[in-house]
Every structure is written in structure tokens, then in C-alpha cells.
Amino acid sequence: MASLDIKGIGASALTEYAMQESKNASAIALQKKLENTANSQHASDDELWQACKSFESYFLEQVFKEMQKSVDALKPESGDQSTETLVDFFKDQTLQEICSTSVDKQSNGFAQMLYENLRRNYDIPEAPAEDAASANGPASV
């Protein structure tokens, strides 16, 4: 097996590549989770609800990132690349947390709509009444 020669590649390029791959992996993992939940015959109501909430959170995150790009286009191109990379990482982590909390506290209804549609289309059974009451399931939305 040939060794990988990375002498010509700068640290910022490697960091950017790693961040992009991380974002892609996150999107793929979420998509697979949603597909597995929707296609599984043993998927419960609660699993589907959690997958829909995760998707709504991811969707909000992508909307906010696109809005941030329009603001970043107006910034001057100056600054330390390593500091900017750390700031970008912090912004991504904070944005993920804000979106997740936003979906838990006050959903915009996207998760509920997705949940009802998937449940109807894939005939996913409802959770037992005592389980649905104890978990913050779709009935409490």
C-alpha cells in the first residue's frame, strides 16, 4: 500500500476537508436514521418522532448556515486562518445546539407534519398509551 504524501497540502486545506467530511457524515447518518426508522416494520412511534425532530433540527441548521453565508459575503477577507477555523467550529457546534433546543422547546411544525405523513404512508404502529404519556412524544406537541 502506497503511503499518503501530504507535504504539499496546507493545514487549513486539511482542516477544511475534515470539516466538510464531518458535515457530510452527519447528513448521511441522519438520512439513514430516518430511512431505517420509516422502513423498519418494528419501528415504534417514538423512534419515528425522534427521527423527525432530528430532521427538523438539521433542516433549521442548514437554513441558518445559508443565511450566515450571505452575511459572510460582506465581510473583508482578513484574519488568522487558524482562529477563523476555531470560530467556525464553535459557530457550527453552537448552531447545532440552538437548533436542537429550538425544536424541543417550540417546533415550527415541520417535524409533526413529517411524522404524520411517514406514519400514514408506512403504517407505523402507535406506541402504547403509557409509553407515549411518559415520553415527550408527538401527543404533547
Image (tube, rainbow, N blue to C red):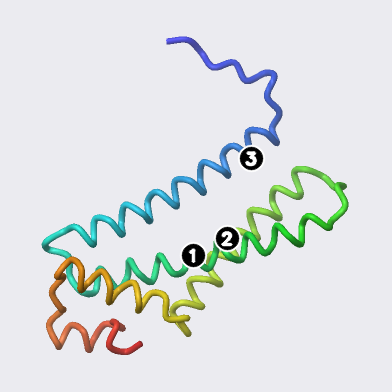
* Residue 93 image label: 2
Residue toward you, 82 or 56: 56
Q: Where is residue 80 in the image (x, y as percent from the top left)?
A: 82, 45
| Amino acid marked by disc 1 | Phe
- How far apart marks 3 and 2 lie (CA) works out to 15 Å
34 left or right of 76 in image: left
| Amino acid marked by disc 3 | Glu
Q: Which of the marked residues, 1 or 3, is nearer the chain's N terminus?
A: 3
- How far apart marks 1 and 2 lie (CA) works out to 15 Å
Q: Looking at the image, do the residues carrying marks 3 and 2 touch, with CB atoms under 8 Å apart?
A: no
Q: Looking at the image, do the residues carrying marks 1 and 2 touch, with CB atoms under 8 Å apart?
A: no
Q: Which residue is drawn at 24% across and 74% down?
A: 46
User: Is the residue marked by circle 1 packed among few (<14), some (14-19), or many (20+) residues within 10 Å?
Assistant: some
Displayed quadrant of residue 35: bottom left
Displayed quadrant of residue 87: bottom right
* Residue 59 image label: 1
Which residue is most to the top? 2
Q: Position of residue 100 (x, y in %)?
A: 48, 71
Q: What secondary structure is marked by label 3?
A: helix
Q: Which of the marked residues, 3 or 2, is nearer the chain's N terminus?
A: 3
Residue toward you, 14 or 68: 68
Q: What secondary structure is marked by label 1?
A: helix
103 left or right of 47 in image: right
Q: Which of the marked residues, 1 or 2, is nearer the chain's N terminus?
A: 1
Looking at the image, residue 10 lies above or below residue 99: above
